[in-house]
Amino acid sequence: MIDVVVIGGGPAGMSAALVAGRGKKQVLLIDEEKPRNAVTHASHAFLTQDGIKPEVFREKGRKDLLKYPTISIKTDKVLSVEKAEEDSFEITVESGENITTKNVVLAAGLKEKLPDVKGIEDYYGSSIFSCPFCDGWEMKDKPLILITESSVGLHSAKLLKNWTDDLIIATNGNEIFDADQKKLLEKNQIRLIEERIVELEGTDGELQGVAFESGEKINVSGGFCTTLLDKHFSIIDSLGIELSEAGFVIADSLGRTNIKGIYAAGEITGPSQLVVSASQGHMAGIGIINDSSEAAFEGI
């Protein structure tokens, strides 16, 4: 029986595996190798790693893990996690293998849906971003567009005003702001365009202009967008793990969920930056060592 299975090989999963492995636990990290940030050219705001390419971060992380004989990595897809007898879990993976473990760390990333704008994928991660804390500095003081199809766009606009005073919001044909919110945008000199976007213009992933249904075209030097996160994870449903009103896994400061032996870290507990996910994974690893040490000490 393996001590810990970590599902997901991003910053949260790798950090959890590293801490648990250094705690003399036999750890298996299972990852599909389909990271959400694969389109991102650089990750920012992680001390000593500012500007690192996501693929380089993952490569360096895996090298760190494999220094320890207690840690192994498997490229596979987890199909199910079921509660077994004697405080253990049975995990089935796509390759057909069945794995028994005492503890599970849920650290799988989330899938995101971009606004329904033709060609936006060509610019996402290069000149259109979703997180101002991650990419706001690189886009500071430029004429930007915020493409949003949901009411969270107002919050994004408030944040983006910290980095630029030249901001336009485009709702792509959706009426998502009420009269008071529109007045607030106007007061902050943010133009609101509610027409459908018919074309994004630019070269080599660099957004230069946006064309609207009316024929109007605006010049920009990049932008941001709000995305929808797919939080559906069948494993969570089958185990009866408690979720927040927003649909994220509820976990305490040490990554514990309401199910003994199940820990969670990273995006599955809520949207987070790379550095935050890594921290949460670290704390989940500490939680595992803390709980197993407590049980062993009291059980003697």
Image (cartoon, rainbow, N blue to C red):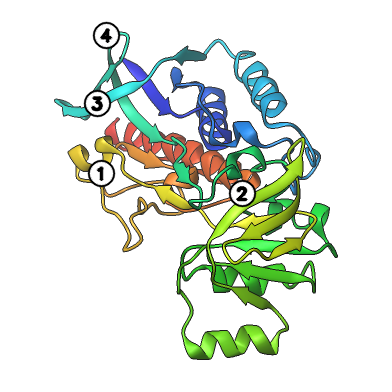
SS category of the residue bearing label 2? loop
Whether the residues at callouts 3 and 2 have beta carbons within 8 Å, the answer is no
3D distance between C-alphas at marks 2 and 4:
33 Å
Give the number of the mark in front: 2 or 1.
2
* N-term-proximal mark, 4 vs 1: 4
SS category of the residue bearing label 4? loop
Return the residue at label 3: 80
Taking depth in this image into account, of 51 and 100 the one nearest to the observer is 51
* N-term-proximal mark, 2 vs 4: 4
- The amino acid beneath tag 3 is Ser
Return the residue at label 1: 259
Q: Which residue shows up at 59% across the image and 14% down it?
A: 68
3D distance between C-alphas at marks 2 and 1:
26 Å
Q: Is residue 258 left or right of residue 201?
A: left
* N-term-proximal mark, 2 vs 1: 1
Taking depth in this image into account, of 242 and 226 the one nearest to the observer is 226
Return the residue at label 4: 96
Return the residue at label 2: 273
Q: Quadrant of the C terminus?
A: top left
- The amino acid beneath tag 1 is Ile
3D distance between C-alphas at marks 4 and 3:
11 Å
Q: Is residue 36 left or right of residue 5?
A: right
The 10 Å Cα crowd at callout 1, few under 14, some 14 to 19, many 20 or more, is few
Taking depth in this image into account, of 268 and 147 the one nearest to the observer is 147
